[in-house]
Amino acid sequence: MIRIAIVGTGGMANAHADAFNKLKGCRLVAGVDVLEENLTRYCDKYEITNRFQNVKDLLAWGEFDAAVVATIDSAHVSCALPLVKAGKHVLCEKPIAPTAAEGKRLVTAAEKTGVINMIHFSYRNSSVLHHARKLVADGKLGRLMHIEAHYLQTWLTSPVWGEWRETPAWLWRLSTEHGSKGALGDLGVHIVDLATYVANENIKQVTCKLKTFPKAAGNQIGEYKFDANDTALLQVELTGGCVGTINTTRWATGQINSLKLSLYGETGALRLDLDKSNDELEVCLGADVKNGQFKTVKVRKTPSMAERFLRSIRTGKNDDSNFRRGWEIQRVLDASFRSDEQAKTIHIRT
């Protein structure tokens, strides 16, 4: 029985509890949150007896094997680092850290202690990503030439997830003073991972344009100053020479939560749209290339992130969604911020 502690009991913690409670061989044994009201509500909901307001007290108790770090982004390192150093397996929410330099501390500690370490790139729960990656790895698309990817949301133009002007859970995402890295940090981390994971390549150079739009009188509501980026446009080149664009915005009216990827190779192409399906993609392969026809392919279900975390603990073989991967993605985001600030292309050492 793998005993799991949940560190941070906000919105994403519910998704983690639901995922692990569906699986055999694991049990939620502790909750941690600095806000006692949130901690009580969460632990009561999931019938968790052991409750702590900091990681230090959790470790002093110690009767757990692994932890999920689902705190605000800026607390990922401060919460995950002592857990890793204590020999606890950790599944950490994305991003690994606000900067790659901070994230490298987690990578170094995890690789030194040998604990299982994973970043929760939630869209890897989609079976279609793994099938698409294998198509590329098997050479079905040939040499990759062009890539297009986007992650679009509409919560700044639609109350579909609640009225952002009245909800701290949304307001903080617009304010750098409250730890936000904007759309690039929040959504960009997902789409950069998704695109490069399927392509089986990393990004070696990026040119980025960030944009923040006025949203309220004085561009501020209460304590929240709206200075975090709303939109990020990335022109990228991958390690194999493939070029293209990766874009994200919170101003995509009518797009509630749209993730799309198109990947074009010398001998084939693929398209996937997670807004429509997690287990179907379109491919143009073989004889269809001549006529430019795409066919829909249904793929088999693959293990969820929670299942892969448990499997890694049981086998001792770390899943590839590890801290080092999270650090690599953060390096791309850091380079994107520098590109926008300096108005030039940034090369990323590989």
Image: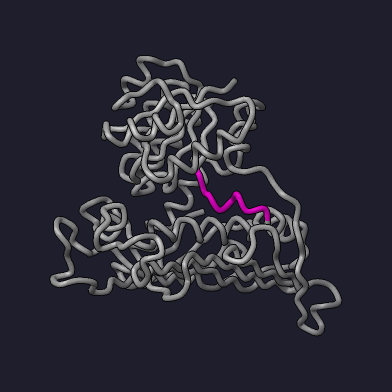
User: Can you tell which quarter of the image residue 227 is in?
Assistant: bottom left
Instruction: Say which of 261 and 275 sits in front.
Output: 275
Residue 40 in the image: state x and y as whole percent.
33, 30
Q: Is residue 149 above or below residue 99?
A: below
Residue 92 in the image: state x and y as whole percent.
45, 39
User: Can you tell which quarter of the image residue 60 is in?
Assistant: top left
Q: In this view, does 48 lie above or below 125?
A: above
Q: In this view, does 296 lie above or below 132?
A: below
Is residue 257 visible in the rendered structure shown here?
A: yes
Which residues make up the magenta segment? 120-127
Quadrant in the picture for the N terminus: top right
Residue 251 in the image: state x and y as whole percent.
38, 73
Q: Does the magenta stretch include residue 124?
A: yes
Residue 147 in the image: state x and y as whole percent.
59, 71
Give the number of callouts. 0
Prevailing secondary structure of the magenta residues? helix
Instruction: Say which of 307 and 232 sits in front.
Output: 307
Q: Is residue 301 magenta?
A: no
Coloring scheme used: one colour
Residue at horizontal 53%, vertical 55%?
Answer: 193
Residue at horizontal 32%, vertical 24%?
Answer: 52
- Residue 341 relative to residue 16: left or right: left
Residue at horizontal 43%, vertical 67%?
Answer: 153
Is residue 267 visible in the rendered structure shown here?
A: no
